[in-house]
Structures are given as structure tokens and as C-alpha cells.
Image (cartoon, rainbow, N blue to C red):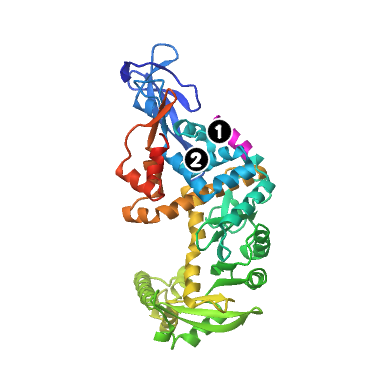
Amino acid sequence: MKSKDKYLVPVPDDKGVHIKSAGAKGEKYVYKYVKFFRNSEGYPRNKARSIGKLSTEPGMMIPNSNYFEIYKVAASLPDVAVWDYGYTWLFQKVCNDTGLADILHAVFGPRSAELAAMAAFIIREGNIMDHMAEWQERNYLSDIDHPVTSPEASRFFSSITQEERIAFFRLWVKRHYGGKSVCYDVTSVSSYATNLPEVERGYNRDHEDLAQFNLGMFCDEDTRMPLYYDRYNGSLTDRSNLSCVLVNAEDIGIKHVHMFMDGGFWSEECIQSLARECDAFTLGMPVYLTDAEQAIRQCRNQIERYANELPDYHIYCMGIDSTLYGVSGRIMVYYDPWNHANLCSELSESIARMEAELKKCRRYPKSKLKYFSRYFRLTKHEDDNGFDYEADTEKIENQQKNKGFFLLFTNDMEASASSLLYYYRAKDADEKLFSQIKVDMDGRRIRTHNEQTTDGKTFVIFIACIIRSYMFGKLRQYLHDNSTSMNKVYSQLSNIIMIESEGKQRFAKALTKKQREILQQFGAHEAILKSLE
């Protein structure tokens, strides 16, 4: 048996392997790129690890521990394959448990295995596909018999047709839509591409100076499961396109819904579309509206009574029948005393900081007049640049009066104030989905350059989002109790190693306590042990 420092292996000829000189003697070492990413300015960057020292024997090298880790070859048994097993095994189990595997196979046939593998990669590594082939080398994917390179991934994305996506959505919605309440929200996805019809300048929610397309997502309120998305032009506003989105959603099976949406959708056009297309809707109502201010004034002096209390939330609510833009419904006025006290305290602190700034000003602050005038009256001295100021108590007290109030408008005349609040607050499921796509799976920018590839890659990211959302739901309590993250969970799972030799498979080591606890959230502790029997 050869020791690691004497063991010679051929210099790998796969992508990312390169040689650099180091040290005073200029000795040559072999490196391999292990991570590809883009920096905050969007430029491609990479990270490399040394895998050994170049030997004097042509084409050979002395491997180090990184080589055996990256290429999963045991130093003492070079004919043994070693795989990261736990993450990909659990991913496949979740696909089976949710019915996703069956639906993907029904729509895509044998291609479904490659699609699922790309979704698994995106969850774990992000959406830059350049190093998926290297990731495959480390992970056990029994249904994939070829490396998925970046060009191969692009070709796969382009091969996904609109008919296949619609077929998937119809089957998925049929299986996972509960038939009751759904939430809907929109985000923008930036792109450097200039030749995509739907990539246009518009309101960029990430405040990037880039064109984008819009992505509207439907989510089941009860299960938090992503149901369907609609991609549309970046220049279209959420309000103007809502009617088309609702019709498209109905076509794939999202019917007879109670929609919950935030106040960003507030407009006459949206409210009339919701009333026309949905069985019921509940919409956040901005407090600055004239109708909202009137409702608050009507309720302010009588809302904080026992008859109006919602015990589960420790807040109060009154409903006012109203007709807005020709749609009959109720304005639900909610008041949170605790939030009122906190917001008033924050307002006082903000005013105090502003007054401290004014005290330091030697001249009339003309450039910041709008800023200070929110809470102060400023009077410029006629004979010099000095000024006097005093707090505008009327403005301040008017703002204090409305702190702690928030309003909903609904045309559901039977739902209770508590249930409306519960489902409205639950709509943050969509916001969390967008956070998963943009932050956890690096989906802030799409990095595609034609329409077909963009459509296909967006669909695969959506499949990844389904699985990650399901996993997050199962792990929510575990993450909270252990103050950990999904990425750390993935690392624990990936460290469940499988060894394959002479047609037999076994675990490299026993499961740790953390690994067992994670798997138990899925009822999978015993199942993974039996998977290699």
C-alpha cells in the first residue's frame, strides 16, 4: 500500500485544472477551480484549490488530501469510488414524497432525471451552471450517465417547450392546489441580455440599473407550496398585467380562489379585475388613501374595546361596509396598541435626531428643507443666513394618531377578522420564495441570452424552489431550535458518504447525531440506512 505523499496519479485533464508556480524555487503545483461565481458588479470570478505537486515524471503528479476529497478516490484503494450521498438521496425522496418525480416523468419522460439533477444542483450551488459537471463528480446521481456541462445545460433549457410547462402546471396544480386561498406576488429578475423581448427597463425591485423581466408567483396559502408562475415583460406594471395573469392561472386550474395580495397592487384596475376573476379577494389598503383616513377617523375612538378584540393576536378590529371603485366590500380596520407605542417611540427618537442635526446647522438648510419640514417649521432670518425652528406639533400628533393602524379591503363578507388577518399574514410565503430564488439560489440575475433558454432555466429554478420550499417547511422548527441555516443542513447531508467497490455499496461512517436529527424531520432516518442494504 502506497502512502499519499509517494502515490503518483495522472494530472487530471478535466475542466478547471491548471498549473501554477509557487515558492522561491518556483516549484509547480496543480490547482483545480472548485467554485465559479460573480462578484457584486457582475464579473465572473472563481476559487481554486491545490490538488497536488507536479512530478518530474511527465503527466504525473503527487496528490494531496484535496485531490482525494475532490475526486472521491481513496488513497489506499484507488479503484474505490466515494460519493457525497445524503443530500442527493434526500432530494430524490422529497421528489417522490411530493409526487414531483411522477409528474416530471409523465411530462418529460427520461429527460426528467436530468431536469431534477439540475434543480438539485441549483438548490445546493446556485444557478451558474459552469461547474455542474464537477459537482456531479462528487455527488451520487445514479440516473444520470453523462456530465452536464454548461453548454449541455443551455441546450436542455432550450428544449423545454411551452406545451411541456403548461402540462406540468396543470398536473402540479391538480395535485397540490387545495381549492381555497392563494397568495400572489411579483418580483423582477435582472438580465444583462439585450436581445430578449421580455427583458425591458421598468421598476427594478432590487434597485439595479439593469433591464429585467417580471415573475409573478402563486402559492397555496395553507401548504405554502409554490403552484404556478407567470413571466412577463419588465416594463409592464403589476397592476396593468394582473387581469392577464389571473386568466392564465385559471387556464391551468387555479380557479374559485380567494386571493390575498399586498397594498402594492392597490388600484382601481386591480380591484375590478380581482372582483371579476376571483370568488373573493383581500387586498392591503394604503393608509394614506382618503377612504382609509376616513375609516381610521371613524374607528379611532371606539376600536380599543373588548368587543373588538382579537384575543389570538392581542389586537383590535372593526369592519366598515364600503364600496370602492364600484366593488362592494368591507374595510377592515386593525389596531395594534403595542405596535402603536413602539412606532410612536421610534418617531420621537427620529425627531430628536433631526433636532440634533438642526442645532448643528449654522446656516439655513435650504438643500434639506423638505427633510426637516416633515416635523419642524423653519424661519430664515432676514438679515443673515441664520434661522429659527420649532416642532410642528400638529403634524407630529397627526402622525402619532395613525401609528399602529393597518387596513385591509375585502369583498368576502362572511370571513372573520381573525381568519382574514391570518391568511393575509401568511402571504409572506411568496416573499420567502423570492428570497430563496434570489439569495439562496443566486437567482437575482438569470444569465441567459435567448428567449428559449430563459424560459427553460426559469422553469428549472421553479422546480428547485418547489423542493427547497418543501424541505424548508419540514425543517423550519429544527432550524429555529438549532439556530442554523439551510446551507449548513445541506453540508451535513452531503457529508453522509457512500463507498462503492466491486458492485457493493456501504456508508463510509456512521450517521452523526445532527444528521439523524435532520433526517428525522422527513421520517427518513431508517429509510436511508436501508437504501444501501
The answer for how far apart the CA atoms under marks 2 and 1 are is: 11 Å
Q: Residues within 10 Å of mark 1 (few under 14, many from 20)?
A: many
Q: Which residue has dot 1 on it?
A: 148
Give the quadrant of the C terminus.
Answer: top left
Q: Residues within 10 Å of mark 2 (few under 14, many from 20)?
A: many
Q: Is residue 162 above or below residue 419?
A: above
Picture quadrant where residue 307 is located: bottom left
Please indicate, yes or no, whether residue 378 appears anywhere in the rendered image.
no
Q: Which residue has dot 2 on it?
A: 121
- Which residue is found at the position 47% from the left and 52% from the top? 470
| Residue nearer the viewer, 169 or 20 | 169
Residue 27 drawn at (x, y percent): 36, 18
Residue 40 drawn at (x, y percent): 47, 46
Identify the amino acid type marked 1.
Val
Q: What's drawn in magenta, residue-wise?
A: 145-156
Please indicate, yes or no, whether residue 296 appears anywhere in the rendered image.
yes
Identify the element where label 2 is drawn: helix
Q: Is residue 431 above or below residue 327?
A: above
Q: Residue furthest top?
A: 57
Identify the amino acid type marked 2.
Phe
User: Residue 147 in magenta?
Assistant: yes
Residue 128 drawn at (x, y percent): 52, 40
User: Residue 366 in magenta?
Assistant: no
Q: Is residue 207 above or below residue 116?
A: below
Q: Earlier in the sequence, mark 2 or mark 1?
A: 2
